[in-house]
Image: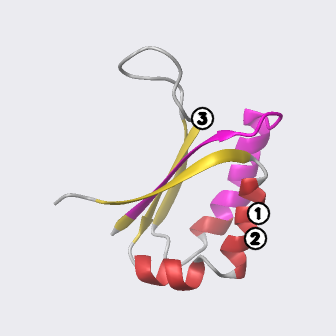
């Protein structure tokens, strides 16, 4: 099962409260409704465990995708994900999209 991990900052002017309300009311129901998404959670980054300074991101999203090929070839270009990506892109800046596999 592939993990898709996103990390990003909010666009200046988008508040944490506004963004998190959008996540709960729009992003979660939409993305969790896609059959190839086994799980999806968004996490607010609150600090560094080790080291000093500020984290390089405000949020991290983690998706479990059992059928990564189907997700990228059918779901990603589809209307549902393309629609939510437009909303998402207007709220965040410099998103980094990572694909990871668990070491077993």
Q: Residue furthest front?
A: 94
Q: Secondary structure at mark 2?
A: helix
Report the residue marked by disc 3: 58
Name the residue: 69% across, 51% down.
24
Residue in the foreground of this view, choosing between 93 and 78: 93
Q: Secondary structure at mark 3?
A: loop
Q: Is residue 56 above or below residue 101?
A: above
Secondary structure of the residue carrying tag 1 is: helix
Q: Give above or below for 66 relative to 23.
A: below
Name the image quarter holding residue 84.
Answer: bottom right
Position of residue 10 in the picture relative to residue 48 (left or right): right
Residue position marked by numbered label 1 in the rendering? 86
Read off the magenta span: 3-29
Give the CA distance from mark 3 to mark 2: 23 Å
How far is disc 1 from disc 3 in space, using C-alphas?
A: 19 Å
Q: Position of residue 104 (x, y in %)?
A: 16, 60
Based on the displayed image, in which of its 4 quarters is residue 100 positioned? bottom left
């Amino acid at each position: 099962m592939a993990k898709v991990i996103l990390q990003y900052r909010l666009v200046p002017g988008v508040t944490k409260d506004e963004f998190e309300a959008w996540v709960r009311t729009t992003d979660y129901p939409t993305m969790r409704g896609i059959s190839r998404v086994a799980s999806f959670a968004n996490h607010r980054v609150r600090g560094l465990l080790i080291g000093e300074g500020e984290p390089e991101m405000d949020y991290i999203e983690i998706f479990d995708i059992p059928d990564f090929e189907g997700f990228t070839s059918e779901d990603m270009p589809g209307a549902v994900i393309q629609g939510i990506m437009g909303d998402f892109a207007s709220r965040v800046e410099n998103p980094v999209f990572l694909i990871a596999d668990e070491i077993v």
